[in-house]
Structure formats: structure tokens, C-alpha cells
């Protein structure tokens, strides 16, 4: 697969929602997700946060079964790139680029099979929150990690 064979567009099943920050003299509050706004199959099983230094990319990765619910609320902004690598999908070979973070808070729901990576574009280190619908490494961390990692594949077509 040539890396430039992707077409920019909107990927089927990817959900992008603006997040609202309630600002007052104390600071801000931002809801990340609510189960009454998520279909049952993707209700989170866990959550984690990561901080990424400016200029650094995490991913690209993909999952066979896991759906990710990423929230970019800051600090820091990100260039998020998604690639539809599902041959059965109506939007197979589509690449979707989203900018999100402190200046544009967003939730991005990424279905299994959609390759994803994000680059911290500053200012300063960037925080990302994720609430996957599967446990990392299963119950008690005794199982396999559902993850395909492309960042060390020199032939990977998934380049940010
Ligand atoms: C995700 C996760 C990781 N870890 C441990 C495993 C490693 O020792 C360390 C760093 O994990 P990793 O190198 O996988 O972090 P990223 O490269 O940022 O990848 C993560 O963010 C990208 C965008 C993804 O899509 C991956 O699914 C997700 O793993 O945290 C845990 O202990 N629990 C967890 O839930």
C-alpha cells in the first residue's frame, strides 16, 4: 500500500465532538464523556492519561477489537491523524486529520481497525485522556495487548 494512496475525508464510524469548557472566575470544568451519550458497546472499561512533549508523535497504532475514546482538552494542542485500514469499510483508504486540544477541545471516538496517531504541536507538553472499551492486557493485565504498532515499521504507509 503506497503511503500516498489515502484520500483525505471523513471516516465511517469515527465520531468527533466538540467539548465544552464551563469557564468562570475559578477556572474551567469540562465533561469528557457520559454513558447516556455513548452506545452501550463502547462504554469505557478503563481510562488513562498521557503527556506528550512538543514535536513528539504517539502511534500510529490500531486495535482489532478496542474502541478508543480520546479526549483532547489541553494543556497543549495535537494534530490527530486517522487512517481507515478496514477493507470492508465504505471509507477504506480514507485519511482524516483533526486538530484538537486546549484551543479546540474535542472527543474523538476511534473504532477498531482505524489506525490512529497524534503529534503534540505545543505550546508545551500535551495531555491526552483515553477511555477505551477494553481493559489494557485484559483482566489483571494477564492477557495479550490488543494493539498493532506501526511507528517502527519503515514501510508503514501511516505517516503523520
Ligand atoms: C495504554 C496503556 C499503557 N500502559 C503502559 C505500557 C507501557 O509500559 C507504557 C506506555 O504505553 P505505550 O507505549 O503503549 O503508550 P503509547 O505509545 O502512547 O500508546 C498508547 O497511545 C496510543 C495513541 C495508542 O493508541 C495505544 O493503544 C496506547 O497504548 O504504559 C499501561 O500500563 N496501561 C495502558 O492502558
Image (cartoon, helix red, strand yellow):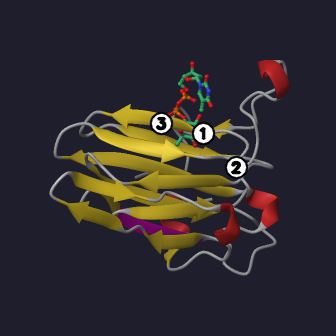
Which image quadrant for residue 134? top right
* Residue for badge 1: 47
Q: Is residue 14 above or below residue 2?
A: below
Q: CA distance from mark 2 to mark 3?
A: 14 Å
Q: Position of residue 87 (x, y in %)?
A: 77, 68
- Which residue: 67% across, 39% down? 46
- Which residue: 25% across, 36% down? 125
Residue 49, labelled with which disc? 3
Q: Is residue 27 above or below residue 14?
A: above
Q: Position of residue 103 (x, y in %)?
A: 23, 62
**Which quadrant of the render holds ligand 1?**
top right
Are there few (<14), some (14-19), or many (20+) residues within 10 Å of tag 3?
few
Asked whether the beta carbons under mark 1 and mark 2 sit within 8 Å of each other, the answer is: yes
Are there few (<14), some (14-19), or many (20+) residues within 10 Å of tag 2?
many
Answer left or right for 5 relative to 128.
right
Q: CA distance from mark 3 to mark 1?
A: 7 Å
Answer left or right for 124 relative to 96.
left
Which element type, helix, strand or loop, lies under badge 2? loop
For the record, the magenta segment spans 94-99
Nearer-N-terminus badge (2/3)? 2
Which element type, helix, strand or loop, lies under badge 3? strand
Q: Is residue 6 above or below residue 152?
A: below
Q: Main secondary structure of the magenta part?
A: strand
Residue 44, labelled with which disc? 2
Q: CA distance from mark 1 to mark 2?
A: 7 Å
Are there few (<14), some (14-19), or many (20+) residues within 10 Å of tag 1?
some
Which image quadrant for residue 141? top right
Amino acid at each position: 500500500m503506497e503511503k500516498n494512496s489515502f484520500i483525505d475525508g471523513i471516516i465511517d464510524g469515527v465520531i468527533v465532538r466538540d467539548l465544552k469548557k464551563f469557564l468562570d472566575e475559578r477556572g474551567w470544568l469540562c465533561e469528557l464523556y457520559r454513558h447516556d451519550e455513548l452506545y452501550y458497546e463502547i462504554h469505557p472499561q478503563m481510562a488513562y492519561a498521557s503527556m506528550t512533549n512538543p514535536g513528539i508523535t504517539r502511534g500510529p497504532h490500531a486495535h482489532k477489537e478496542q474502541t478508543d475514546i480520546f479526549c483532547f482538552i489541553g494543556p497543549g494542542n495535537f494534530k490527530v491523524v486517522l487512517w481507515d485500514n478496514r477493507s470492508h469499510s465504505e471509507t477504506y483508504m480514507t485519511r482524516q486529520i483533526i486538530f484538537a486540544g486546549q484551543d479546540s477541545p474535542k472527543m474523538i471516538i476511534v473504532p477498531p481497525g482505524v489506525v490512529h496517531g497524534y503529534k503534540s504541536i505545543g505550546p508545551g507538553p500535551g495531555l491526552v485522556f483515553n477511555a477505551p472499551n477494553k481493559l489494557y492486557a485484559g483482566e489483571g493485565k494477564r492477557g495479550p495487548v490488543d494493539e498493532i504498532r506501526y511507528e517502527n515499521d519503515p514501510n508503514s504507509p501511516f505517516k503523520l
